[in-house]
């Protein structure tokens, strides 16, 4: 459960930049998943604690 709620890998940004991909989009995705995981991990842990 925690692995699924973890943020996206920052290495994907580096790979996107080096291989000519959309690096700004990948930076946004990594930032969004990092912020979202800060909210979803405690919620999921609390939800499964009471089951």
Image (cartoon, helix red, strand yellow):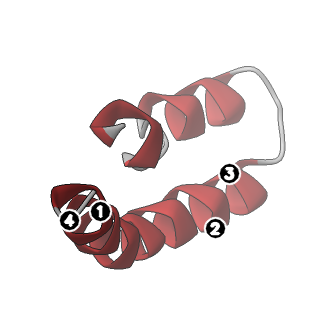
Numbered badge on residue 26: 3
Q: Is residue 48 left or right of residue 27?
A: left
| Residues under numbered marks 2 and 3 in contact, where contact means CB atoms less than 8 Å apart | yes
Residue at numbered disc 1: 41
Q: Earlier in the sequence, mark 2 or mark 1?
A: 2
Q: Disc 3 on helix, strand or loop?
A: helix
Nearer to us in this view, 43 or 14: 43
Residue 49 image point, x, y percent: 16, 59
Rendered residue at 39%/70% (across/down): 40
Disc 4 or disc 2, which is closer to the eye? 4
Nearer to us in this view, 28 or 17: 28
Residue at numbered disc 2: 28
**Structural distance between the alpha carbons of marks 3 and 4:** 36 Å
Rendered residue at 21%/70% (across/down): 46
**Structural distance between the alpha carbons of marks 2 and 1:** 20 Å
**Structural distance between the alpha carbons of marks 2 and 3:** 5 Å
Q: Earlier in the sequence, mark 4 or mark 2?
A: 2
């Amino acid at each position: 459960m925690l692995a699924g709620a973890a943020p996206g890998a920052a290495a994907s940004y580096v790979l996107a930049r080096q291989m000519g991909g959309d690096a700004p989009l990948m930076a946004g995705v990594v930032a969004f998943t990092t912020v979202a995981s800060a909210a979803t991990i405690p919620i999921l842990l609390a939800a499964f604690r009471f089951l």
